[in-house]
Image (cartoon, rainbow, N blue to C red):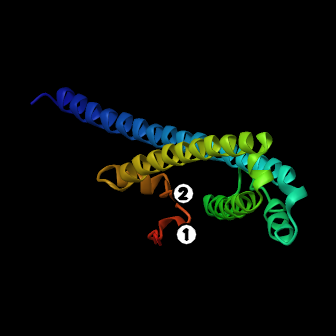
């Protein structure tokens, strides 16, 4: 066989492998950008949720006596920064969920507060923000799932290991919300 033809085939195969390697690394990087973008969506929803909790607390504060300390401790929670880990954001989301539950209990205990238009508007806004947060979590977890699947399958895992692409953490639900609901009549 012609040595130039053999050399051309070898160079062609090497170029194909190099192009595949670069394309795969770029794909991993693109997926990481999508994960960061969806994490930012969670940050926005958590901030909105925290702000709404603060407003709801301020609106209900006049009616509260002994519940005040519990609710104030929730409002004083440290809002996580974008650079914080997903675990820190999960912990914050769980604490705010507990605070919202406590405020809803207070609202139920005070009929005048429950009937207030401001409280009703804030509760409706809170429900909408909760839906937005759930959607942001689903998008984030979907992006993480696709990325994690891609970096662990062969031959992608070889390139992922070489490029030090690591699995990302999922945004987990509050353990209290995973528990079975007990209905008592």
Q: Residue furthest left?
A: 1
User: What residue sits right under mark 1 in the picture?
Assistant: 176
Left or right of 40: which side holds 142? left
Secondary structure under tag 1 reads helix
Left or right of 42: which side holds 9? left
Residue 156: x percent and y percent? Answer: 35, 49
Q: Are marks 1 and 2 in contact (CB under 8 Å)?
A: no
Q: Which mark is residue 133?
A: none
Residue 132: x percent and y percent? Answer: 59, 41
Residue 36 appears in the picture as rendered: no
The residue drawn where x is 77% and y is 59% is 110
CA distance separating discs 1 and 2: 15 Å
Of residues 44 and 39, the one nearer the viewer is: 44
Left or right of 18: which side holds 93? right
User: What residue sits right under mark 2 in the picture?
Assistant: 171
Residue 56 appears in the picture as rendered: yes
Q: Where's the N terminus, which quadrant?
A: top left
Residue 141: x percent and y percent? Answer: 48, 50
The residue drawn where x is 47% and y is 58% is 167
66, above or below 111, in the image: below
């Amino acid at each position: 066989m012609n040595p130039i033809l053999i050399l051309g085939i070898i160079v062609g195969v090497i170029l194909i492998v190099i192009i595949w390697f670069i394309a795969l690394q770029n794909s991993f990087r693109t997926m990481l950008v999508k994960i960061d973008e969806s994490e930012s969506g969670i940050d926005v929803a958590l901030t909105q949720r925290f702000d709404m909790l603060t407003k709801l607390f301020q609106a209900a504060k006049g009616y509260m006596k002994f519940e005040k300390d519990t609710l104030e401790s929730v409002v004083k929670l440290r809002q996580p920064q974008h650079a914080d880990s997903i675990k820190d954001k999960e912990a914050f989301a769980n604490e705010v969920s507990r605070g919202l539950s406590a405020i809803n209990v207070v609202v139920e205990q005070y009929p005048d507060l429950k009937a207030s238009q401001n409280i009703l508007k804030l509760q409706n806004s809170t429900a909408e923000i909760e839906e937005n947060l759930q959607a942001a979590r689903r998008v984030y977890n979907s992006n993480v799932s696709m990325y994690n699947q891609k970096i662990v399958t062969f031959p992608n895992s070889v390139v992922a290991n070489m490029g030090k692409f690591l699995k990302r953490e999922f945004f987990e639900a509050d353990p209290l919300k995973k528990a079975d609901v007990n209905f008592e009549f």
